[in-house]
Image (cartoon, rainbow, N blue to C red):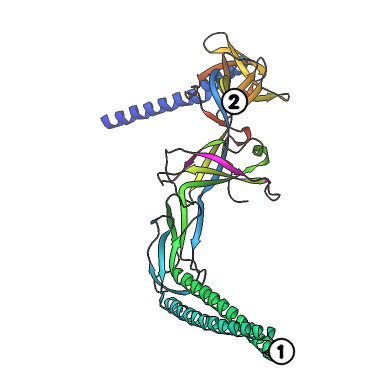
Amino acid sequence: MFRRLVVTLVTLGLLGALGWWIYQRYVQAPAESQARKRSGAIAVEITPVRQATMREEGLFTGTLLPRSQFVVAPKIAGRLEKLKVNIGDPVQSGQEIALLDDQEYAHQVEQAQAELEVARAGELEAVSAFEAARREFERATALREKKIASESEFDQAQAEFKAADSRRKVAAAQVQQKQAALNTARTRLSYTKIQANWQDGAGQRVVGERFVDEGTMLAVNTPIVTILDIQNLLAVIHVIERDYTRIHVGQAASLITDALPGRTFTGTIRRIAPILKDTSRQARVELEVPNASLELKPGMFVRVRLPYAQRDNVTVVPLSALVKREDNEGVFLVDLKDDRNGLARFVPVEAGITDSRRAEIVSPRLTGEVVSLGQHLLQDGSPVVVVGTAKATSRASQPASSPADAKAPRAGGRP
């Protein structure tokens, strides 16, 4: 009996709760909605008009490259006997990078030295013969003047003198030739010591890649290692024609990279391509990025901000507050009658710098609150009921990108 009573009471309680829910869902709520419709008030959210600093910026993506790089390669063929550096090692200008087997080139120097000695001996012999022929020619000339020597004897002495002079000159030229051959052999021997040299000779660079191992037979110009200058990097971006006229050499920029979150780096535009490629309508721009700490590495992906303009203490409203009515851009200001109820008044405006959240109002000068949610339902003079007030941004100097690029940086890949 007691159990049946409990079940009956529980059932009645559940039925009562169900009835109350149905009343609220299908009777009370529609009644409130109908009352709101009869009053014509539209629920909106408002945001105060504020003063802030707005900056217009171009946002680009790009890639870091070494400021300079070159390949170290042998000028002669040979076996790589010793490789003195490896990937990541610091390198100074003039530093010895590798050694080739120099035995063959040392023998060539010895051979050239011996050939030079032979040529010098031949020159001495030719000089001696020339002196003898000269004296004989002088004697024949004197005898001819005294009518003692015949004309044929004079002619023979003269011919021998000229021949001796020619042999002397040939011997002297051969000495020069052999000296040049010796110099060449010595130079080729010096090429077995491979060095890293660059024009200014200043600063420290690093080995970027290694291509061969010790013992490898190298042909002329076979790459051994690459040498990189990463104390200053290049950030390469590509800009479209709309931004092309707004940048200039020497313009400062800020850079961030996903590899070093929370860090911001600086750069300066150094070169701007004089043409825009007809396939992409983009121009290549190179920025120099100081990297004394060597934290940044070539190949890193970067996002680059280029400042275009900055305006201080300007009137700003939420970007969502901007609407169009009859081809006029404007905002809805709320004239409140009490804490919640009022009228929406459409005010045409001229917008300036915008970003992903805010818009500058150039004219007229606004005060009060603007509708930031629910404005798509409004017309000039519509009654409204305020259901909430949005928090204004606390960052008074939030940077702004170009209007068309407020949501995402422009791609900076190679066109």
Q: Residue furthest front?
A: 146
Q: Do the residues labelled 1 and 2 touch (CB within 8 Å)?
A: no
Is residue 155 rendered to the left or right of residue 191?
Answer: right
Where 122 sits versus 403, above or below? below
**Residue 16 vertical position relative to residue 345 in the rendered view, above or below:** below
Residue 286, percent from left and from top: 57, 45
- Nearer the N terminus, badge 1 or badge 2? 1
Question: Which residue: 44% across, 23% down?
Answer: 20
Percent position of residue 40, x then y: 62, 16
- Judging depth in this view, the residue of 169 and 61 nearest the camera is 169
Q: Quadrant of residue 98?
A: bottom left
Circle 2 residue? 359
Judging depth in this view, the residue of 330 and 280 nearest the camera is 280
Q: Decide: few, some or many residues near mark 2? Use Cα within 10 Å; few <14, some 14-19, many ≥20.
A: many
Residue identified by numbered label 1: 151
Residue depicted at 68% across the width and 87% down the height = 154
Q: Which segment is the magenta one?
A: 254-281
**Which residue is rendered at x = 48% and y = 25% of the image?**
395
Q: Can residue 356 be seen here?
A: no
